[in-house]
Each structure stands twice: as structure tokens, then as C-alpha cells.
Image (cartoon, rainbow, N blue to C red):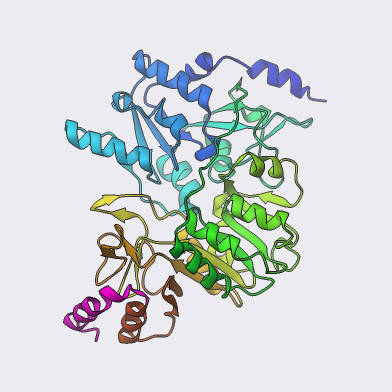
Amino acid sequence: MTDFAALYAERLTTPQAAAALIPSGAKVAMALGVGQPPALLKALADRAEARQVGDVNLYYLLSTAIAGETVMRFELTDRIRPHSLFHGAIERKLEARGIEEGRRAVWFVPTGFQQTPRVLTREIGVDTLLATVSSMDAEGYFSLGTNTDYALAVSKSAERVILEVNPHMPRVFGDCRVHVSQVAALVEHSAPLLEAGKAPQQPQDLAIGALIAGMVEDGSTLQMGIGALPDAVCAALHDHRDLGIHTEMLTPGLVELMKAGVVTNARKTLHPGKTVFTFSMGNRSTYEFLHENPAFEARPVDYVNDPAVIARNAKMISVNATLQIDLFGACCSEYLNGRQYTASGGQLDFVRGAAASEGGKSIIACHSTAAKGTASRIVARLDGPATTPRNDIHYVVTEHGAVNLKGLTDDARARALISLAAPEFREGLEREAKAMGLL
């Protein structure tokens, strides 16, 4: 019988010694969000600062302050080059400072979320994984906990798997385990997990939440994103019954629906009785509820976000926010003021999967205006790339109503979308639609 405790002891080391295993020229995959390992990232940053390592390419989604204060400090980006597959505030600041100082400080890799495991392991060929995991179980397995996403695939292919064991990381059921025999080095670091802040809600969020809740039938299966708008939808669903969850991101709003008995997963047609997700960002209550809870199954993103898998959930409801929708029906959810703002994430995966589901609905939602009411989010033409093409858009919702674009002619689409704009922008949009030959 293998002595897993002995294997653990052999691999246990200091963060400094573990970071020293990463050579110059390495291609490092850093776990997403909550899974980013503080002690390991600090040790790697310290080595880069001392110029003991360089020419490192760092690949990841959703950087956090843990990374921003260590490996993603501007002064280190000539030695550790951030390659973001999903931009946030840290990347935007790095980009702005890089422009000021005349050198590039962050690189963007356009990638759909479902494709991420394949892109990282096959196209890029990352050779190192840095991630936070739960304590080891009796069979020698660590749980990736909040972050199965792309970390599981990388753990199977990377030359070096370096893990930070944190007893605060929940042990989660599903396809989300890494065995001690796969690991090059382990470090132990006990620290509370990162918690996502709660976005303040505006009246538009409540109006949109109520509209979308009215489109959800009992027995539906949900996918929600993050932010005030999805939170408002969750809050408006508390009178529903027997809902299910199949989502890329598990949020506190979805967990509260489980605790309230609104989500039972009893009527799911795929993985009945189980909440399926690929990563979670929430609060302490979320993580504690996840720990060893058989109601959850964490699975890799190339499975969870596969449109064919999503479509196997009858009455699949996908709710995603966007930044702009044009009069042709395409939306941009990732580009703002001429710069990459976020990324496509899994929006298109769930748009297509939900639309193909029996009785399913894909919903794209946004406030009708931005910039304190001075700019319309319904526009003649997008300012950036189309995150979801016009052929795929199903339902669109603003605080002014909801429309189904499927089957509509181009002129009918334009009229429907103009009806969702703020009243003060409708006349101008009609003029632009006529100038483009849509009306």
C-alpha cells in the first residue's frame, strides 16, 4: 500500500525552494481568481525582483490583488510577462502605465472560456501550474476546490505542478482532484480565501431582474454571471420552485437560492440533484457551504461550457451582461473606450448552449444607458469586437423591456432594439438605422 503521507512529506518544501524550480523561460499557468496561491506568487516575485529568474510568461484568467501585489507588479513585467485571457482592473492599470512609459506591460490572449484548457496545454504548451488546493485526503488527492476550470487539464500535462495547500480551500466533489504523485512540490500556507465584493445595485438592475425572473419557468436550469445585474435576477427568483444550476461561475446569489430551497436540481435532465460549476468566487459563507457538500459537482470548463453539454439541460436559462448592442443584434461585452476591458469569457458558450436547449432561453442584458445616462448602450454599430454575433443573440433585456430577436428580419430587429433604448436616444437611433438602410 502506498504511503501517501510519505509522498506528501517528500514534496513538502518552502515557497522559496518551490519557486526555485521554475526556470527562466518557463510558461506558467496561474490559477484563476480564488485559486491564486499567495505564498508561491510572492516567492516567484521575490526571485524575479532579485533577477534570479526572467523571461517567464504567465498565463491566467481573472487576476486578483494577490497577483497584482506580487508577480504582476509593473516593475517586474519585463521579467514576468502577464498574458491575460480575461482582463480586469489590474490589467487595465498595467496597460495604461505601459502606454505612459512607452513599453508593453501586459498581453491579451483572445480565447473563449471553453477553449482555455486546450489553448493552454496544446497551443501554448504551458509547463508549470501554480494553484491553491485543499488539504490532502486519505487517498492522496487534493481538491482544486473553487477552481477546476483549466487547472485540472494543466495539472495533467504540465512538467511542474506546484501546489499551495490551504486548509481554508473547500474540498469539493466532482472531477476536480490532483493526486500527490503528480506534484513536483508542495507548500503549506493557511490564509482566508479571497472574497468577491458585492456590487451596489441600481434601480435598473431591479427592473431587469424582475423582467428576467418573469421569463424563468419553474424547473429551469440557471447560468448566471457576476455583478449587480445577475444578483438582482437571483433575488427576484425566490418565489420559483425546483430550479437547477449548470453554470461556469458559482456565485453567492446562486448559493442563496440553494439555501432557500428554490434550487433543488430535482428536475434537471443532466446531472439531476447536482449543482454543476467550474469555478467559484464568493464569500466565506459560499466556500463553507461548498466544503464536502454532495449537492455540488465541480467539473472542467471544457465540459461545463461545452454548448452541446449545456443544451442537454432542458429549460436552460443563460443570463449574461453586455456593454453594447448594435442595431444588427450583435453585442460587445469586452471592449470599452477603445481598449480591452474584460474578455468574452464563456458568454458565447452559454448563449449557444441555452438557445439549443429544449425550452431554453439565452438572455443578454444591460442598462439602456452608460456614463450616468449620457451614452446609449444600444448603438448603431459596435465600438469593439462582437462577443456574441447577431446570428446567436436570442433574448435582449434592458429596464425598458425584453425582446426575442430570433426569426426577426433586420428591420424588425432594429425596431425591437430601439424600443429597449432610453427614450431620449430612440429618435437618433432611428435616424442612424435609416442612414444604414435598416429602416
Determine the residue positioned at 75% across, 24% down. 4
The answer to whether residue 12 is above or below residue 71 is above
Q: Position of residue 287 (x, y in %)?
A: 65, 41
Quarter occupied by residue 393: bottom left
Q: Quadrant of the N terminus?
A: top right
Is 388 positioned to the left or the right of 102 in the image?
right
Is 375 positioned to the left or the right of 276 in the image?
left
| Outermost residue to the right | 1
Question: Is residue 266 or residue 377 the one in the foreground?
Answer: 377
Q: Quadrant of the C terminus?
A: bottom left
The answer to whether residue 384 is above or below residue 171 is below
Q: Position of residue 280 (x, y in %)?
A: 58, 46
Residue 148 in view? yes
Q: Position of residue 363 (x, y in %)?
A: 49, 69
Question: Is residue 383 or residue 133 the one in the foreground?
Answer: 383
Tell whether position 421 is magenta: yes
The answer to whether residue 116 is above or below residue 393 is above
The answer to whether residue 162 is above or below residue 325 is above
Quarter occupied by residue 93: top left
Determine the residue positioned at 30% across, 28% down. 74
Q: Which residues are magenta?
A: 420-439
- The chief SS type of the magenta part is helix
Q: Position of residue 103 (x, y in %)?
A: 20, 32
